[in-house]
Image: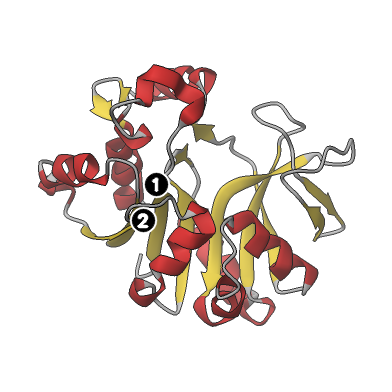
């Protein structure tokens, strides 16, 4: 795939306790390989060539590991948070000079078994409507739902709102237009979800419904699910 993908992987992973006290979440062992290797292998199989990693906590460990997996044959570039955590929004702003005009964004703790090309095709068909947010009918099964979706439209998106009407969740993948997020990020927004809220409120972001569940390693139960999923693939 010609399009670039940005992976935001700079968090402290405080919910995992001692498991990530001296290594970044992306390097958690999943059936013999660091999580990020499983993630990148899948992206390569989806046709991606250009990957940009936004790193923070113990970034040097990730960079060292990836140098040892050079057979992935990916063009990987990096931007670093520095001494302070920038948040997902701040990390993306910090990487903007390395971002192409259109690009995917994915979180560093998410494994998304979907067809990325179909999301891109949907974007091309709906280009005038701009940015894409993938959503999944979660019904708070795998994490707290945060999207109210109705009649082919995201009616409301809010990670901090508890509502029985929220039956969908942000799947963890978006396709963004650089020119439309620059003005928002210039307001020093630290959380990428706030960017999405603004785009949705301005009718500049539309949903893409995903049918396959996501996997994430932000919690111990998520790691267990991820390991079981990889076992089934072997």
The numbered mark, 2 or 1, whose residue comes first in the sequence reads 1
Q: Is residue 149 above or below residue 37?
A: below
Q: Which mark is residue 10?
A: 1
Q: Quadrant of the C terminus?
A: top left
Q: Label 2: which residue?
A: 81
The residue closer to the viewer here, 116 or 219, is: 219
**Left or right of residue 144: residue 60:** left
Q: Quadrant of the N terminus?
A: bottom left
The image position of residue 11, as x and y in percent, is 44, 42
- For the point 66% across and 82% down, which residue is it? 128
- For the point 39% across and 46% down, which residue is it? 10
Mark 2 secondary-structure assignment: loop
Q: What is the residue that sits farthest to the front in this orientation?
A: 83
Labels 2 & 1 near each other (Cβ < 8 A): yes
Q: Is residue 29 above or below residue 52?
A: above
Mark 1 secondary-structure assignment: loop
């Amino acid at each position: 795939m010609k399009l670039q993908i940005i992976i935001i992987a700079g968090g402290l992973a405080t919910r995992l306790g001692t498991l990530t006290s001296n290594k970044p979440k992306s390097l958690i062992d999943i059936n013999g390989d660091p999580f990020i290797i499983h993630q990148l292998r899948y992206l390569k199989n989806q046709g991606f060539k250009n990957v940009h990693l936004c790193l923070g906590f113990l970034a040097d460990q990730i960079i060292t590991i990836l140098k040892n997996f050079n057979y992935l044959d990916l063009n990987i570039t990096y931007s670093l948070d520095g001494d302070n955590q920038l948040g997902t929004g701040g990390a993306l702003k910090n990487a903007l000079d390395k971002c192409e005009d259109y690009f995917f964004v994915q979180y560093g703790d998410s494994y998304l078994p979907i067809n990325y090309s179909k999301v891109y095709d949907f974007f091309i068909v709906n280009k005038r409507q701009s940015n894409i947010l993938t959503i999944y009918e979660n019904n708070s099964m795998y994490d707290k739902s945060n999207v109210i979706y109705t009649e082919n439209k995201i009616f409301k998106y809010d990670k901090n709102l508890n509502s029985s009407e929220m039956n969908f969740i942000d799947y963890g993948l978006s396709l963004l237009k650089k020119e439309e997020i620059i003005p928002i990020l210039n307001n020093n927004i630290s959380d990428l979800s706030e960017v999405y809220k603004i785009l949705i409120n301005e009718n500049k972001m539309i949903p893409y419904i995903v049918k396959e569940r996501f996997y994430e390693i932000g919690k111990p139960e998520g790691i267990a699910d991820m390991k079981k999923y990889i076992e089934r693939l072997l």
